[in-house]
Amino acid sequence: MARRTIATLVRVKDENSRTAWEAMATPAPAQPLEPEALAATARALQLIEQEQRVPGVMATVQDPFACLLQTHCAKFGASTPLPGARTLEVKFDEHDAIRWAASAVFTWWKRITRFRWAEPASLAGAFPNTARVAVFGDWATGLYGAPEVSRSIVNEPAGYQLVLHLGDTYYSGDRDEVDEGLIQTWPRAAGAIHRALNGNHEMYTGGEAYFEAVGREFGQTSTYFALQNDHWILAGLDTAYSDHGLHGAQARWIAELLAQAAGRRLVLFSHHQPFSLLEAQGPRLVAKMAPFLKDRRVFAWYWGHEHRCALYDAHPAWGLLGRCVGHGGFPYFRDKLPGAGGGATAFVRVASRRGVPGADILDGPNPFIPGHEARYGPHGYASLEFDGPHMNEVIRSASGEILRATQLV
């Protein structure tokens, strides 16, 4: 019987790294395969194979076991350097994957527990009345446009007072991936507050590596937080501890923030989306936030999870401005939309439907994926500029070029 080959990718920093990765390739001992492990592995391999449509380009799926399998194989598979790339391609066939799953990955998966939940030390921290915020999501690959985003933020002459990642460290947020993809390449803008929200990929290994790292590196003691000045409240939510929902007392915390708002406008940040024109909706998340949405207490909401940049019109029922900025560093195929697919970077209009407002969606080639530039969408981030009661939004390319600047209020 022919043995099909599937591939995943590993970051590499130097020639010695290649030797180290290859030296870790260890065969799994033969043992009987449990039916549950067989079923989980077959499903994971199918998902990975379906998603890996372009050889040599990072791909993943929204599935915990499949991502754990990718992480494990990236560490212990036989690797091959890719020409002109800072990655190794780790190939594994179905027989290898099934042996690994039986001996290690499946056992690992079943033993994973979530990190211990922690509440913020205070209701809200202080934030200057004049301040700039760098916001980027789904960035922690250490590859493609992600390092360029980091360089652009660090080298911004005007500086930033808050640097904020909206979550997802690939493939499954284990300690090595958090260290290499999130911490080592983090844009350490001088004098800024640094925060990283929790994402579903961090939670695939229970989130412990992520939570320990942000506590150690950023002094971040909770996975949700708020900052406020005389005019604005910026609140980051954890929508991953309870997948695409709100765990614990976060909704009550938002109510407490608004009770003392005294005219301040509220801007939310999260990993998951409350609504979308192109992907899943967020009914569990919206249900928790319903009182604030119905009363139009949210001015704007920025999220990731979807790998694209989408700027929504004001929501017809809730009034808020929705913003997806999940194009920070993970390779994503360009949306097949009317007017999309050209050689220039531009916004494409998508009309409202099913109660979801219309949006301008960023389209264009990705220069950081050599040989496949035209197939993948551009990486980038957002700069938010607060000046007293005013808020400007600037959408930037990975290199910092201004693609759109808008005064929101």
Image (spheres, grey):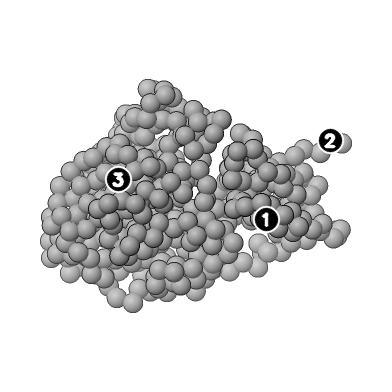
SS for tag 3?
A: strand
Provide residue 377's location: percent of width, then percent of height: 45, 35
**Image height of 237 relative to 339, above or below:** below
CB atoms of marks 3 and 1 within 8 Å: no
Question: What residue is drawn where x is 50% and y is 31%?
Answer: 373
CB atoms of marks 2 and 3 within 8 Å: no
Q: Which mark is residue 2?
A: 2
Residue 186 occupies quadrant: bottom left
Nearer the observer: mark 2 or 1; the answer is 1
Task: Left or right? Give the position of 46 relative to 363.
Answer: right
Circle 2: residue type: Ala
Question: What residue is drawn where x is 59% and y is 53%?
Answer: 13
Mark 3–mark 1 distance (CA, rounded to whole Å): 45 Å
**Residue topped by disc 3:** 322
Q: Which mark is residue 180?
A: none
Q: Which mark is residue 16?
A: 1
Q: Nearer the viewer, residue 405 or 6?
A: 405
Q: Earlier in the sequence, mark 2 or mark 3?
A: 2
Nearer the observer: mark 3 or 1; the answer is 1
Question: What residue is drawn where x is 55% and y is 48%?
Answer: 62
Q: Is residue 1 visible?
A: yes
Question: What residue is drawn where x is 61% and y is 34%?
Answer: 54
Provide residue 374's location: percent of width, then percent of height: 49, 28
Task: Left or right? Give the position of 177 relative to 222.
Answer: right
Q: Nearer the viewer, residue 15 or 329?
A: 15
